[in-house]
Image (cartoon, rainbow, N blue to C red):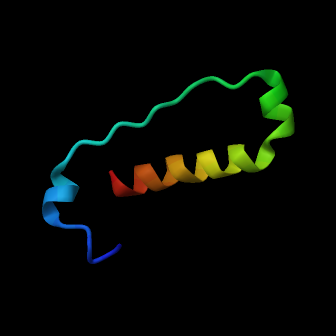
Amino acid sequence: MSERITPSHLARKALVYVRQSSMHQVHNYKESRRLQYAMKDRMLELG
């Protein structure tokens, strides 16, 4: 983790906005979906 992240940053609550994709988006934007799942996994790692 970056040294620029301080304990006060880590003490803050975080929000993640999630919206449902259309079937067109699901079928045509696979890279975006992969990145979103990776972001979810990272958020879980960070707590």
Residue at (84, 26) in percent of width and height? 24
Tag count: 0
Q: Could you say where residue 3 lies in the image, as x and y percent from the top left?
A: 27, 77
Q: Quadrant of the N terminus?
A: bottom left
Q: Is residue 12 left or right of residue 21?
A: left
Q: Could you say where residue 36 lies in the image, as x and y percent from the top left?
A: 61, 45
Residue at (35, 56) in percent of width and height? 46
Depth check: 35 or 46 in front? Answer: 35
Residue at (57, 25) in percent of width and height? 19
- Above or below — where is 23 with respect to 9? above
Depth check: 24 or 44 in front? Answer: 24
Q: Is residue 33 left or right of residue 40?
A: right
Q: Is residue 23 left or right of residue 46?
A: right
Residue at (35, 37) in percent of width and height? 15
- Above or below — where is 24 with respect to 4? above
* Location of residue 14 (image quadrant): top left
Report the residue that reaches farthest toward the front.
4
Q: Could you say where residue 41 lies in the image, as x and y percent from the top left?
A: 51, 51
* Location of residue 25 (image quadrant): top right
Q: Is residue 12 left or right of residue 26?
A: left
